[in-house]
Structures are given as structure tokens and as C-alpha cells.
Image (cartoon, helix red, strand yellow):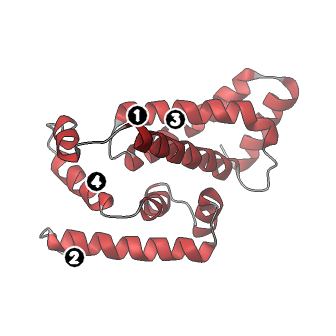
Amino acid sequence: MSNRDDLYWITQFTLIGDNKAFEKLIGKYQSPIRRFFLNLTMGDASLSDDLAQETFMKAFVNIHSFQALSNFSTWLYRIAYNVYYDSVRTRKQFIELNVPEVDLYHQTNNAFSAEKIDFYKALQQLKKEEQTALILHYMEDKTQKEIAKIMNCPQGTVKTYLLKGRTKLIDYLNNESYDKK
């Protein structure tokens, strides 16, 4: 499905009330949005599912405000970004976490988890904005221009987040005995 298809399904939903059209949009974007949240939440699948569901509910309620000034995916990721940061702010107000205890609780025992855990530990060294910019750019294939719209900041700021984030990741991984390859 292309952006043209997205616009077709949005039109079908908003003008005719065709709920199946919105289901098509969910089908297309559910996995990428969930993956975005999985990376932001350091692999917390339950929280990622909840945040993805909230994102689609907000998109459903507010789809009439979509003006097609950018791609639908950019608009949807902007909602997802806001949902995530609202969640972070809410959790900060109510929970003081014992990070090592939480990390121990969420460990998995599969063959690939060590690398994934190391990557998540490396991401935790970054500011939230740097994490988000790197995840959107490298894992969600978003351009710097799209990231700027999603994060509601200047494109130069996105470039700075990407540069600083990459530098911090490289430094952390080098300090943890990973070679540059």
C-alpha cells in the first residue's frame, strides 16, 4: 500500500464511514508502530501493545483532523510519539523504579537476548530524544525531515540528536568490548 492507498482508505473512512477502511490502515501500520514502541520501551511487549492500541484509538478519534500535509505514516508516528511521552510522564509521577530489579524481571532466556539486552542497555545511555531519533531513523527508515515532523523540532535538531546518539552508542559499545565493524 502506498500513500495514495492510505489517502483512499482515509477518505473511505471519513466520508463514507467505512470501518473496514480504517482496519486496512491498522493492518498496514500495526507492526511498525508496535516495533517502534518495543524499541522505545526496551522490549516491554505488554506496554508496547498498550501504547500501540492507544495510538490507534487516538488516530481513530482524530482522523478527521488529518490534513494530508505530510504522509499518513508521519501523522500516525507523531501520535505514537506523543502517546509514548505522555506515558513516560505519567509513569514518572507514580513510580520509582528499582532499575536492576526490573531488568532482572524482564530478562528472557533465548539465544539472541544477550545482544538485544546489550543494545537496550546502550540505548538507555541516551537521552529520550536521541533514542527516539535513532529508532525512527535506523529501525523505522524515517528521513530526517519526517523525524522532525514527528518529534516537532527543527531538522537541524534531529541531525544533532542522531549525531550525538550515534557517538554515545559507539562509545558505550566500544567500552563494553564491542569492536567497530
Residue underneath mark 3: 52
User: Where 40 falls versus 157 (above or below)?
Assistant: above
| Residue displayed at 82% across by 48% down | 67
Q: Quadrant location of residue 57?
A: top right
Q: Quadrant of the C terminus?
A: bottom left
Q: Are marks 1 and 2 in contact (CB under 8 Å)?
A: no
Q: Mark 3 and 4 residues: CB-CB less than 8 Å, in contact?
A: no
Residue marked by disc 1:
47
Q: Are marks 1 and 4 in contact (CB under 8 Å)?
A: no
Question: Marks 1 and 3, how far apart in space?
Answer: 9 Å
Q: Secondary structure at mark 3?
A: helix
Q: Earlier in the sequence, mark 2 or mark 4?
A: 4
The structure residue drawn at horizontal position 70% and vertical position 31%, both measured from the top left corner, is: 60
Task: Quickly name the residue at label 4.
Answer: 120
> How far apart are labels 1 and 4 at the CA level?
16 Å
Q: Position of residue 70 (x, y in %)?
A: 74, 56
Inspect the image, locate mark 2, and give the three-letter code of the amino acid beneath it.
Answer: Lys
Q: Which mark is residue 180?
A: 2
SS label for mark 2: loop
Q: Which mark is residue 96?
A: none
Badge 3 or badge 4: first in the primary sequence: 3
In the image, what residue occupies the spot 72% across and 28% down? 21
Sequence order check: which comes first, mark 1 or mark 4? 1
Disc 1 residue type (three-letter):
Leu
